[in-house]
Amino acid sequence: MLKSGRIESTDDFLVAGRDVPWYLLFATMGATVIGGGYSIGAVGKTYEWGILMLLVSTGGYLHFIFSGMVVAPRFREAKLYTVAGYFG
């Protein structure tokens, strides 16, 4: 809301001017993953699968790290907004 008056381009509107600190992006991705459906589902699957669910969860978190370190810089260089833009 604080920056809404300073929107001058599509980049400013869609990807916050490509100027968001890493910790804010980390918090956004965490908020995307952490929710009622995911949390209850994870508890249920942990009860069902046991320790195997730890490996599944770890893979998900490694995915976010990989995306942030490898994929995101390439998207930023290509000035893309979505994964579909990469393929289209």
Image (cartoon, helix red, strand yellow):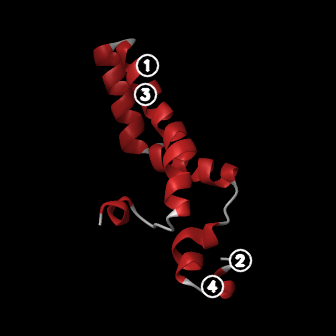
In the rendered view, would you say 21 is above or below 44?
below
Left or right, 60 with reference to 47: right
Amino acid under disc 2: Leu
Determine which of the numbered discs, if any, sits on residue 59 in the image.
Answer: 3
Q: In whole angstroms, how far apart are the C-alphas of marks 3 and 4?
A: 37 Å
Quarter of the picture containing the C terminus is bottom left
In the rendered view, would you say 75 is above or below 64?
below
* Most distant residue in the top direction: 51
Q: Which residue is mark 1?
A: 54
Amino acid under disc 1: Leu
Q: Which residue is mark 2?
A: 2
Secondary structure, mark 3, is helix
Q: Nearer the viewer, mark 4 or mark 1?
A: 4
Picture coordinates of residue 71, whole percent (x, y): 48, 48
Categorize mark 2 by other alpha carbons within 10 Å: few (<14), some (14-19), many (20+). few
Q: Which residue is mark 4?
A: 7
In the rendered view, would you say 82 is above or below 66?
below
In the rendered view, would you say 24 is above or below 79?
above
